[in-house]
Image (cartoon, rainbow, N blue to C red):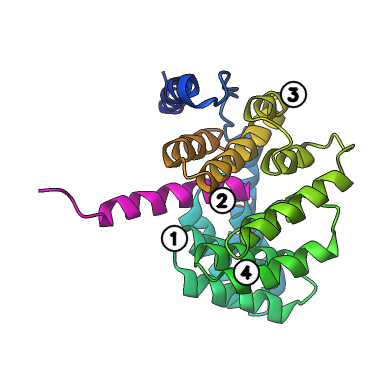
């Protein structure tokens, strides 16, 4: 059996035990963890050959480094991705998207000051690159700079107010500032979109208290193929983990973050943030004084 399968089985047993006492889902949906495809490997080799050919101008070369960095990132090879994004920026210093990816890498390593600087650079170079505002908001959230994070996420959410994920992150950040206002705001947002069956709005329904954990898991299990299932479960278990954090149920939160990671959806921000949550949780435990 693979380590990923064993991890999923262990989480299933833990969550099943918790369900007997806490009303948590009695059914845990699992997907076959995503694997790196032959096409992705072949694309990676091809880009490497183009880079080594010495026939491209600087702007073209920086684009190739960026594209290879994205491929590395999607494969979970963070260090290799960081190196290529840094190369792209070295060649083309005004390459805004590369700064954003580099900032996400720094965030995953808890290098918050470097992450802020990278996102600042991305926004300064291209104010219309709106995703950088989301990335910076998330970094500020994990760096405990909640009011600054709220400013960025409100700007990002206002651009597409009907995007459920933007509403979810507005809620998570506002919960750190004014929980009652955050809950009321999210509930109002949900009611305005309660007829939507899009997957993202099921996440909003869960956090707004309009969908039970068990029904949410069932909704996450509705998919046409394994990739879609893995992607939805990556998101579902991450946001269930955040819900458990809000409810101060840390053991369940950790279990859900591990289930999110187990899907191997490396390109999703929820995968990266689940790893970050687990890393920060482990560090908190190490800092706690031990009984003599």
Q: Is mark 4 on a helix, strand or loop?
A: helix
Q: Where is residue 268 in the image (x, y as percent from the top left)?
A: 63, 46
Q: Are marks 1 and 3 in contact (CB under 8 Å)?
A: no
- First in sequence, mark 1 or 3: give its number: 1
Q: What element carries label 2?
A: helix
Q: Is residue 22 left or right of residue 283?
A: right
Helix, strand or loop at label 3? It is: loop
Mark 4 / mark 3, whichever is N-terminal: 4
Region in magenta: 266-292
Q: Using the image, tell me which numbered label, if any, was put on residue 109.
A: 1
Q: What is the C-alpha distance between the residues marked 4 and 3?
A: 33 Å
Q: Which residue is drawn at 77% across and 36% down?
A: 199
Sequence-wise first label, 2 or 4: 2
- The residue sitting at 75% across, 25% down in the picture is 223
249 over 70 or under it: above or below: above
In screen coordinates, is 27 left or right of 19?
Answer: right
Residue at the spot 54% in from the left edge and 48% down from the top edge: 246
Q: Mark 1 vs mark 3: give the one in front.
A: 3
Real-space CA distance between mark 1 and mark 3, rounded to the nearest whole angstrom: 33 Å
Disc 2 to disc 1, how far (Cα)?
17 Å
**For marks 2 and 1 on the same chain, the one whose residue lies earlier in the sequence:** 2
Query: Circle 2 sits on which residue?
Result: 72
Give the mark nearest the N terminus, 2 or 3: 2
Quadrant hosting residue 174: bottom right
Q: Which of marks 4 and 3 is in front?
A: 4
Q: Mark 4 points at which residue?
A: 149
- Between tags 2 and 4, which lies in front? 4
């Amino acid at each position: 059996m693979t380590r990923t399968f064993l991890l999923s089985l262990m989480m299933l047993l833990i969550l099943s035990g918790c369900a007997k006492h806490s009303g948590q889902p009695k059914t845990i949906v699992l997907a076959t963890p995503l694997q790196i495809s032959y096409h992705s490997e072949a694309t990676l080799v091809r880009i490497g050959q183009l880079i080594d050919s010495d026939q491209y101008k600087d702007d073209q070369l920086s684009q190739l480094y960026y594209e290879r960095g994205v491929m590395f990132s999607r494969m979970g090879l963070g260090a290799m991705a960081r190196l290529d994004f840094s190369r792209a920026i070295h060649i083309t210093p005004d390459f805004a998207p590369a700064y954003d990816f580099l900032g996400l890498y720094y965030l995953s390593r808890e290098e918050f000051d470097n992450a802020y600087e990278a996102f600042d650079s991305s926004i300064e170079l291209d104010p219309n690159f709106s995703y950088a505002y989301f990335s910076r908001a998330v970094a500020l959230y994990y760096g405990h700079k909640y009011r600054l994070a709220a400013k960025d996420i409100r700007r990002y959410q206002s651009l597409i107010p009907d995007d459920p994920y933007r509403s979810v992150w507005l809620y998570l950040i506002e919960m750190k500032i004014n929980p009652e206002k955050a809950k009321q705001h999210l509930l109002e947002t949900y009611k305005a979109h309660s007829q939507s069956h899009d997957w993202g709005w099921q996440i909003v329904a869960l956090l707004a208290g309009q969908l039970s954990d068990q029904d949410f898991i069932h909704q996450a299990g509705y998919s046409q193929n394994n990739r879609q299932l893995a992607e939805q479960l990556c998101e579902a278990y991450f946001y269930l983990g955040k819900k458990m954090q809000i409810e101060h149920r840390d053991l369940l939160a950790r279990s859900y973050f591990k289930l999110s990671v187990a899907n191997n959806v490396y390109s999703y921000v929820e995968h990266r943030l689940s790893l970050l949550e687990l890393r920060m949780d482990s560090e908190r435990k190490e800092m706690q004084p031990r009984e003599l």
